[in-house]
Image (cartoon, grey):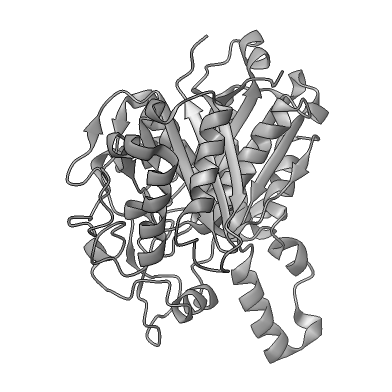
Amino acid sequence: MKRRVVVTGMGAVTPIGNNVDEFWNSVKKGQVGIAPITKFDTADFDVKLAAEVKNYNAKERIGFKQAKRMSHFTQYAISASREAWEQSGLDIEQEDPYRVGVIIGSGIGGMSDMESEEQRLLEKGPKWVKPLFIPMMISNMAAGNVAIDLGLKGKCTNVVTACATGSHSIGDAFRAIQANDADVMVAGGTEAAVTPLGVAGFTSLTALNKTEDVSKASIPFDKDRGGFVIGEGAGVVVFEELEHARKRGAKILAEVVGYGATCDAFHITSPAEDGDGAAMSMKLAIKEAGLEAGDVDYINAHGTSTHHNDLFETRAIKKALGDEAYNVKVNSTKSMIGHLLGAAGGVEFITCVKSINDSFVHQTVGTTTTDEECDLDYVIGQPAQMEVNVALSNSLGFGGHNATLAVRKYSE
C-alpha cells in the first residue's frame, strides 16, 4: 500500500514577493510583477520586459560567504528552502538525516555565470576563469547546497525537464516518500535566466512577447496573446509521510494525492496539437488520487500566453475532463509572475495549496477576450471565492515533457 504524503512547509522567491505570504497577498490583489528589465541594457534587444525578482539581498538572506559561492538560482533555492523548512517545524537533530532528502531542479542553471566566465575567458584567458565556476553553474547545485545547508543526507537529486522541472521534482519527491525511500523530502524548482543570452535565445525562438505594455505582456488564453514573459524565482515545499507528520504534531497544509508524467513524443518546443500527452498526464494524476473528473475544482494551468500552449492545453483539459471541463476553474499564475521556467511548477503548486487553504482562486490577470476555442472558465475579470477541495497543477516542458500534480484538502 502506498504511503500517504502531506505538505507541511512552503517557501517562495518570486517577482511579486520574496516569501510565501508576500507572494500570496500579491496574488490575491492581482499584482503584476512584470516590468522593464534592469539586469542588463536592453537597447539592442527586441524584448524589453521580464518578471525579475525584486528587492532580494542574497547577502542578508543567506550570508555573504555563502552567497558569494552560489549562482543566483541556488541563492533563490536556499532562501525558499529555509522558509519551507522553518514553516514545517522540522528539526534535523530529531530526524534520521538519511531519511530526509532533496529534489530541487533548475531548467537552465547558472546561465549568468556561463556568460560572465565566457567573457572573462575571451578577454583575459583561461587562467582567469573562476575556480568555482563549474560547481556554481551546474544545475544540481541547488539541491546539493540545500542539502548541505539543512543537513539532509537522504536522496539528493535534481530533475531537468525544462519548464516542467519544478513539477517533476515535486512529483518524484512524492514518489520517494510513497515508496518508503524517505520520510521527508524538500522539493521544487528554481531559476535565474533573465540574462542577455537567456532573453536573446528565447526571443530568437519567437517564444517571448515583444510588447512594452506591461498590462498586455502576459495574457494567457487571450486572443491577443503574443508569447510569454521570462521570469525568475524559486518555489520549494516540504513533504512528509502522513504518520511521520502526525507523530510530531505538524500542521498539515494539504495532501498530495496524484502525479502524472507523460511525453508527447511530438516536437522539441511545441506541445502536441491534439493535447493527448497533457490529457493523459492529468488522467493519470486523477486516477491515482482515486477521483473522478467531476471531483476537480480548480486547475492551475501551464498557461504560458503563447498561441500553441494555451490552445493545446485547453484541448488537453477537455480531453482529460470531458464535459466536466466546463465546470472547473482554470487560471494561469503566469499572468502575474511571467514564466519562471524550471521554477514555475514549484510556485504554481504552492498557489494550489494556498487556494485550498484560503478558498480562493485568483483571476487570470490581464486576459479579457479569449480565443474562440479557448472557451473554458479562465477566471477572467475577478477572482473566485470558493471552496477548493481538489486542485491540479499542470506543467509542460520543451521536449514534450508533461507533469500534473493533484493536491487535496487534508482530512483524516
The location of residue 225, given as percent across then percent down, is: 28, 65
* Label total for image: 0
Residue at coordinates 62% horizontally, 11% vertically from top-left?
246
Vertical placement of 123 versus 201: above or below? below
Give the image quarter of residue 348: top left
Vertical placement of 11 versus 308: above or below? above
Vertical placement of 256 versus 13: above or below? above
Give the image quarter of residue 240: top right
Vertical placement of 55 versus 9: above or below? below
Q: Quadrant of the N terminus?
A: top right
The location of residue 93, given as percent across then percent down, is: 76, 22
- 364 sits left or right of 83 in the view: left
Of 254 and 113, the residue lying toward us: 254
Visible residue check, residue 107: yes
Of 392 and 183, the residue lying toward us: 392
- 97 sits left or right of 225 in the view: right
- 303 sits left or right of 172 in the view: left
The location of residue 147, given as percent across then percent down, is: 73, 41
Visible residue check, residue 235: no
Residue at coordinates 35% horizontally, 30% vertically from top-left?
297
- 121 sits left or right of 279 in the view: right
The location of residue 397, given as percent across then percent down, is: 55, 58
